Image (cartoon, coloured by chain):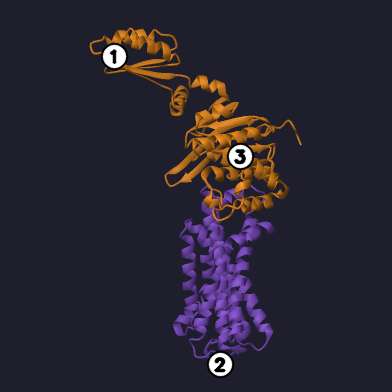
């Protein structure tokens, strides 16, 4: 086996679905290379093509064009060899099986019965062994799916929105388990539409939207990219708005100033200076400072590329 | 074939009490009802008596309904995303279908055995143990074609109601397949083309060797019955394959 081959490579991968409304390009040419041991967030809004791309990494769907290699092999071979495994999005469990039966059935298919106890312990589901899947909470079901994914002892682990439908404490507990596991040197790629999940857990973030890679780099850089905040306030009646706009535009790091009636909106990373100016000299009221949503960051990115 | 997987799947199906009533208890009860409808049922028929004839018919019905219901549950599983979970293991689609058919045949065998036990206890008679064995084995293994039917219909509809459609269809096929009541005239002519006719005729073959229920009626050749079974097996296999491909393309 070639140790040099990356864990995962996607080369000009496209996927077009034929729907009643004509062809739909879910993935419009993705290039990606993930090295061994990397932890990568696959960040994008719903409908960005994350799940379709993940399906192609796992060989659940064949790309319309382009190639996917997992440790230099085809995805299906890698799955059969137990090199790659995944926690799929909601669903994927039989509700009338017990937790123990589910793990045993999947372990039997992987020929990994000796790993059942350690995997159940690691994912904290040993106490749930006799419980029916239908009686498990969303977080417990997700831990069970995580256990199933660990059974083949994969080198590359894919998580598709692993915390969807979990409350905050369950989400934290899940990532705590993941963090311990990641220390074992597995390569991890997870899809999410929570910006904070990418920031807390991934060293590298791949931003995708409309089936394309919009940005790919260290997660800290992404934070700068989305650092722009929006400050808005209402100017006092009678104030000369043109002067206010000019004063705000003169500030450093202000990317735009917009005016709608007496309401003025300033965008830029230096929100403190804008706020000080608005509340002080300009005597504005109703001040609001908002951090950008992920959607706003996407609009900015897609706008910049257009 | 993965035995652990088959065992867990079998246990799972056995916990579905509603389904078991439908697939195992109901055919046995129906045998008791129909068996006493035509007088004592002790009159001779072919190489045995009328009770054996009704027992063989109900065993065929029970086995076919059981395989339909079990195989049809593959559709519900695919809606739940279990198929995707399985696709992350080394098990191939053919292995999945093989395990499903295996479980379906085991439940079908139990269903037919329940009817045969009831028959043996209430006076079904055949001239030789070979007739019992032959009839039973044909019922169990012939029911495999209805596993294809259940899977095909289940995956075509892709909803929870698929199982109801498939099972409801079986009652229709059984009436028009000469299974419940001996048909005659035009009805019997139509019945020869329906999917349960060949299968049930073969299950009854050790007893009747092709004769109708009423003596002096038309006699079916074994080739007509085999042709019916084979053609429907091919049609159901095509349906199952088409449905499987379609359900994949939609992903």
Q: Are marks 1 and 3 on the same chain?
A: yes
| Image x and y of residue B233, in percent | 58, 68
Note the chain letter of the orange one.
A
| Image x and y of residue A274, in percent | 39, 12
Q: Is residue A79 left or right of residue B84?
A: right
Query: Label for residue A57?
Result: 3
Residue denoted by label 2: B43
Of helix, strand and loop, which one carries label 1?
loop
Note the chain letter of the purple one.
B
Given this view, does label 2 or label 3 mark the residue nearer the observer?
2
Mark 3 falls within which chain?
Answer: A
Up the image or down, B209 lies above or below A101; here it is below
- Whether residue B70 is visible to the viewer of this picture, yes or no, is yes
Of helix, strand and loop, which one carries label 2?
loop
Mark 1 falls within which chain?
Answer: A
Q: Residue furthest front?
A: A127
Residue denoted by label 1: A235
Q: Are marks 2 and 1 on the same chain?
A: no
Q: Nearer the viewer, residue A101 or A238?
A: A101
Q: Residues within 10 Å of mark 3 (few under 14, many from 20)?
A: many
Q: Nearer the viewer, residue B227 or A111?
A: A111
Q: Are marks 2 and 3 on the same chain?
A: no
């Amino acid at each position: 086996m070639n140790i040099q081959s990356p864990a995962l490579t996607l080369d000009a991968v496209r996927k077009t679905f034929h729907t009643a409304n004509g062809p739909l390009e879910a993935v419009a040419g993705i290039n990606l290379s993930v090295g061994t041991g990397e932890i990568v967030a696959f960040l994008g809004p719903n409908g960005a093509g994350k799940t379709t791309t993940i399906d192609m990494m796992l060989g659940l769907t064949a790309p319309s064009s382009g190639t996917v290699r997992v440790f230099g092999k085809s995805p299906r071979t890698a799955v059969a060899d137990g090199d790659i495994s995944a926690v799929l999005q909601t669903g994927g469990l039989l509700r009338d099986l017990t937790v123990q039966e589910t793990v045993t059935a999947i372990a039997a298919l992987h020929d990994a019965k000796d790993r059942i106890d350690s995997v159940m312990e690691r994912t904290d589901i040993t106490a749930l062994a006799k419980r029916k899947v239908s009686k498990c909470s969303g977080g417990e079901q997700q831990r069970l799916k995580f256990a199933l994914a660990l059974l083949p002892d994969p080198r590359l682990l894919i998580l598709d929105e692993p915390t969807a439908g979990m409350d905050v404490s369950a989400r934290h507990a899940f990532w705590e388990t993941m963090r311990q596991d990641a220390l074992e040197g597995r390569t991890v790629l997870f899809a999410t539409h929570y910006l904070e999940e990418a920031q807390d857990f991934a060293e590298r973030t791949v931003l995708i939207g409309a089936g394309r890679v919009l940005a790919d780099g260290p997660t800290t850089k992404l934070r700068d990219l989305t650092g722009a905040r929006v400050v808005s306030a209402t100017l006092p009646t009678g104030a000369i708005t043109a002067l206010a706009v000019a004063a705000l535009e003169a500030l450093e790091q202000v990317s735009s100033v917009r005016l709608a009636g007496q309401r003025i909106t300033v965008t830029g990373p230096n929100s403190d200076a804008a706020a000080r100016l608005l509340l002080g000299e300009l005597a504005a009221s109703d001040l609001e400072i908002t951090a950008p949503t992920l959607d706003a960051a996407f609009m900015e990115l897609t706008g910049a590329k257009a | 074939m993965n035995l652990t997987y088959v065992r867990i799947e079998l246990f799972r199906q056995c916990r579905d009490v509603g389904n078991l009533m439908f697939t195992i208890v109901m055919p046995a009860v129906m045998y008791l009802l129909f068996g006493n409808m035509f007088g004592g049922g002790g009159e001779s028929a072919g190489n045995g008596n009328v009770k054996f004839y009704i027992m063989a018919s109900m065993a065929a019905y029970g086995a076919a309904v059981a395989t339909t219901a079990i195989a049809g549950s593959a559709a519900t599983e695919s809606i739940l995303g279990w198929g995707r979970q399985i696709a992350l293991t080394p098990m191939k689609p053919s292995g999945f279908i093989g395990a499903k058919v295996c479980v379906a045949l085991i439940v079908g065998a139990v269903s037919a055995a329940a009817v045969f036990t009831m028959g043996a206890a209430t006076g079904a008679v055949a001239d030789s143990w070979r007739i019992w064995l032959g009839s039973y084995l044909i019922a169990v293994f012939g029911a495999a074609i209805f596993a294809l039917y259940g899977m095909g219909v289940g995956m075509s509809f892709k909803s929870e109601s698929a199982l109801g459609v498939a099972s409801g269809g079986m009652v229709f096929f059984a009436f028009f397949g000469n299974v419940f009541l001996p048909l005659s005239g035009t009805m019997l002519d139509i019945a020869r083309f329906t999917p349960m006719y060949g299968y049930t005729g073969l299950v009854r073959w050790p007893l009747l060797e092709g004769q109708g229920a009423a003596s002096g009626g038309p006699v079916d050749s074994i080739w007509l019955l085999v042709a019916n079974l084979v053609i429907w097996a091919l049609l159901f296999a095509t349906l199952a394959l088409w449905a499987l491909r379609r359900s994949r393309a939609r992903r």
